[in-house]
Structures are given as structure tokens and as C-alpha cells.
Image (cartoon, grey):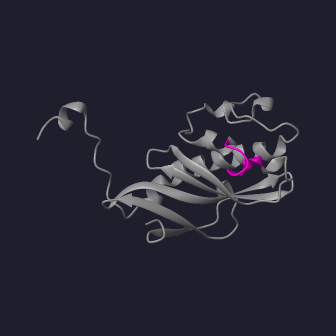
Amino acid sequence: NLFADTLTVDDSPLLGQSEPVTVYRGTWQGAPVAVVLPVIAPDGYNGRIELLVGILVDGTVSGVRVIEHRETPGLGDAIETRRSDWIEDFRGRSLGDPPDERWRVKRDGGDFDQFTGATITPRAVVRAVRRALVYFESNREALFADLPEPPPAADAADRDRP
């Protein structure tokens, strides 16, 4: 239950926040699994884009959702899942995937698509998601400070044992 295990973190330019925010932590059998970070992309075409970025304990993005924006309908609003699956391209990504220099829209030499006639919006979201990953990596220990370490993954030989 993500709402049962929360943590308040101080403002962070990496999250685009200027005041303390609530981070939601996911656990499984008491061990950390993921966090959901509230992130603001301040530089959308029509202003702030508010996001939730889910990051697994290993630093991989589990999902990104836009919760509020004022982007142009029919153009920049393709960041919404009801309009496009564009935002799904972040799932499974991490700071190393793609490499740092490729965390950009294709028009800027990166790996992420932009929208026809609307490059500013996806550019802002890509930067915000990357900053969330940098924040997570820099604060991982503090985000999971009072939780036990996750159990080691079982290898194939362990799964065959009774």
C-alpha cells in the first residue's frame, strides 16, 4: 500500500520542487521494492508539467504518469496515456539506459521521440524523468533508510531445491 508508507523529503531542484514533498514507498514483505516521486517539469510549452515517476529499487523506471499540465490540446497533450503511449517509453529505462548523452529527444540527438510540431513538451518530460533518476540515485539510501534490504534474487539452482 503506497499510501501507508510515505516519506517527506526536502525541496530538491532535481524534482523541480521548492517545498517538501511526499514520496511514496512500495515494499513487499517489508523489503523495499520501489518509490514514486512527485516531479515537476517546469519548462513545458505552457508551463509546469506535474508527473509521478515510479522507480524500482534497482534504479529502473517502473512507470511515468502525467498528473497535471496545460499543454496544447491535440499537440502537447500526447504526454497523456489516454492520448498516446509515448510516455510508456520510459518503462524499464535507467540512468545507463540510454547513456547520459542520449537522454534527449531524437531531434536533439537522443533516444526519445518528440511529437510533430511539439518538441518542447517531450523535451521537458525527458529532462524531468532523467532528473528524477539522478535524485533517486543520489538519495537511494535515505529513501529506503528504515527498511530492510531486499532478499537476494534466487538463481536457477536455488529454485530447483525444495
Q: Is residue 44 above or below residue 101?
A: below
Residue farthest to the front, as pictured: 82
x and y percentages locating residue 64 in the rendered image: 61, 51
Q: Is residue 52 left or right of residue 126?
A: left
Q: Is residue 100 magenta?
A: no
- The N terminus - image quarter: bottom left
Nearer-the-camera pick, 134 or 32 = 32
**Residue at left offset 57%, top offset 49%:** 63
Q: Is residue 98 left or right of residue 5?
A: right
Say which of 31 and 63 sits in front: 63
Q: Is residue 101 above or below residue 34?
A: above
Can you say which quadrant of the picture contains the C terminus? top left
Q: Residue furthest left?
A: 162
Q: Is residue 83 magenta?
A: yes
Q: Which residues are magenta?
A: 78-85
Measuring 78% from the left and 37% from the top, which residue is drawn there? Answer: 114
**Image side of residue 39 versus residue 55, left or right:** right
Q: Position of residue 40 (x, y in %)?
A: 71, 58
Magenta portion: prevailing SS class: loop
Judge whether 86 appears above or below 31 on screen.
above
Say which residue appears at 20% left-offset and 37% top-offset.
159
- State the image coordinates of residue 146 (x, y, percent, origin top left): 37, 64
Between 102 and 82, the residue placed more toward the observer is 82
Give me the residue at 65% from left, 47% from top. Answer: 129
**Position in image of residue 21 (x %, y %):** 61, 68
Question: Residue 49's image quarter?
Answer: bottom right
